[in-house]
Amino acid sequence: MADDDITAGLPADLRELIDSWSGTPAFVRDRHLDVIASNALARAVSPAFVEGVNLARRTFVESDVIDGRPASPEIAQAVTTALRDSLDRHEADAQFLDLVGELEAGSGRFAGAWAEPAADQGDAVLTYRVEAVGPVRLRYQDLRIPDQNEYTLVVMRPADESSRVSLQRLSELTTGLSES
């Protein structure tokens, strides 16, 4: 899928907004948890936030293959909750049903999490292992975009002082790389 296909329905001002946040990791996902747009800092935090990646597939099916380690239980729970919330907001369509079927068949961990009653996500804090700066604990918030029911803006912020310093360092490294 070409980048233009991924971002076809995304308002240009939304893309410009997240790109302007050099110190705040942010991305836009669709109802199937496909990353539609992401800023440089989000991509530096995790390869899961690269445009075109499906967060559910990346978490449950591809995680061991790509990283050599599974996603943390907290990340797995957050993704399962996001998928449930998306189903609650939108009608199940063929793509959604195919995704859930693929995840259930490919991941016992997903099948177990999906079968459990929905958990209250609350104010989730997720830890990402970032090679350049070490672990970064981020608090994230899903924001619905007015007049764009298909998309959700995900904004992350440091959960503690150590993570704030690490995220600032990562932002400086990312900005330095993009300027060269």
Image (tube, rainbow, N blue to C red):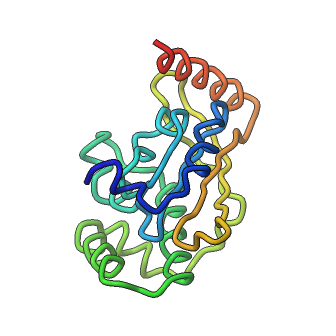
Percent x, y of residue 133:
54, 23
Among the 4 quarters of the image, the one containing residue 135? top right
Give the vertical position of 45 relative to 151 (above or below): above
State the residue in front, 3 or 134.
3
Q: Residue furthest front?
A: 12
State the residue in front, 11 or 56.
11
Give the vertical position of 176 relative to 101 (above or below): above
For the point 64% across and 61% down, the residue is: 142
Q: Residue furthest right?
A: 161
Q: Is residue 160 left or right of residue 94?
A: right
Q: Is residue 139 left or right of residue 105?
A: right
For the point 37% across and 56% down, the residue is: 6
For the point 64% across and 65% down, the residue is: 145
State the residue in front, 176 or 131.
176
Q: Residue furthest top?
A: 180
State the residue in front, 168 or 150.
150
Tally of numbered tags: 0
Percent x, y of residue 179:
51, 16
For the point 48% across and 49% down, the residue is: 37
Q: Quadrant of the N terminus?
A: bottom left
Percent x, y of residue 91:
46, 87
Percent x, y of residue 34:
41, 60
Q: Is residue 94 left or right of residue 158?
A: left
Give the vertical position of 111 relative to 171 (above or below): below
